[in-house]
Image: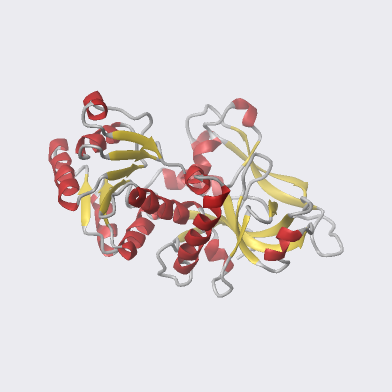
Amino acid sequence: MAESTSTNNGIPNEMKRLVVTSPGNGTSVSDCTVTIETVPTPIPASGEVLVKVVAAPVNPSDYGSWFKSKPSSYPMVIGKEGCGVVVATGGGLTTYRCPVGTKVGFICNGSEQGSYSEYVKLNAFTGVFPMAEDVPIEDCASFMVNPYTAVGIIDTAQQEGSTKAIVHTAAASQLGQMLNKLAHMKGMEIINVVRRQEQEELLEKLGAKHIIVTTSGEEDTWKAELKAKVKELGATSAFDAVSGDMTGHLMDAMPNKGIVHLYGGLAGRANGINPSDLIYRKKELKSFYLTSWIQGGGPLKMVPRMLSAGKVVNSGLKSPDGWCCSQFQDTTMEKVHEEIVELLGSSITGKKLRIRFDGD
């Protein structure tokens, strides 16, 4: 807690939050300057709630922006999602869905505040999501980005007609593991593309049946294996978190009229795409962006989509082995920068940092 005087309801007048004050040379997380600053605790307006943050995860989409943003973005508040307890409301009709004491997951949009804060104020309708009472609130820290991305990927593939199987790269990540579990529930197969043998072993323990290891032999060998799997399982959609040369390899492996969705750029710019695949074989290269999937079709489609997805996600959080439960390595505001740099310098597969604000 921030050391400051408190209001009558026990909420301090000031709080602490993390900011990136400089991207350094703009090439890596380690070059960033991450600072704890003390600021006034936000006051919720009508239609808003104030959440005392319990925990927040460190996602690739978080730290990727720390050193890649435009100069005018700094100092930058950081953190996109988290969980906590509603401690105050600004009144208004929408706040009745999450009164004081409600355990919620939340998302931070815009540049004014981030989830790596002791308190956040949020739109009571679009920014907070009530969590199940029987789930420890700290375990809901990653309730949004990875779980909803997994739901969105499956939904997108189904809408495109790829109902039997999909291809997924960087498949041993926390998201990849969730996707394997969810796809099994939906009766779909995942063709998992990974880089290392230990990642294959991790996925096999989850029950994954179809795994391509890109460093286990000659490039032509695994590419042929991938193409054969795509044909065998009838996959027509692929989701690529890697980019670089991998995007071209996926385009080559997909059947005529197949679709490759880019949703990450771990290896930089997409390369190696054969123009004939796009022109003559009618293959497509698209983006997948969680916010676009959520908002697609406007409010009339967004509301039922989120209600449906929320039921699937909340059900997956109710047990330690639920499909969207994350395995966390806890840290603090003081240590998070050092520890994420350390993880990135080793194997980050299957590991996710969680900043705790409750002192546990």
Residue found farthest to the right: 8
| Quadrant hosting residue 104 | bottom right
- For the N terminus, the quadrant is bottom right
45 w.r.t. 26: above or below = below
Q: Which residue is drawn at 31% across and 34% down?
A: 284
Work out whether residue 128 or residue 47 is closer to the camera in this orientation and state it. Answer: 47
**190 or 267, which is in the foreground?**
190
**Relative side of 263 to 301, left or right:** left
The percent coordinates of residue 261 (x first, y second) are: 35, 40
In this picture, is 255 found above or below 153? above
Quarter of the rendering occupied by the C terminus:
bottom right
Task: Give the image's coloring scheme.
Answer: secondary structure
Q: Which residue lies furthest to the bottom in this view?
A: 134
Displayed quadrant of residue 71: top right
Is residue 98 in view?
no
* Residue beneath the point at 69% across and 41% down: 112
Question: Who's the residue at 31% across and 39% down the image?
Answer: 260
In depth, the one of 43 and 295 nearer the eye is 295
Q: As drawn, is 252 to the left or to the right of 168?
A: left
Query: Residue 165 location in percent, x, y?
Result: 26, 53
Image spot of residue 6 (x, y percent):
84, 59
> In the rendering, at what x and y percent does residue 354 appear?
53, 56
Direction front: furthest residue? 300
Q: Nearer the viewer, residue 20 or 70?
A: 70
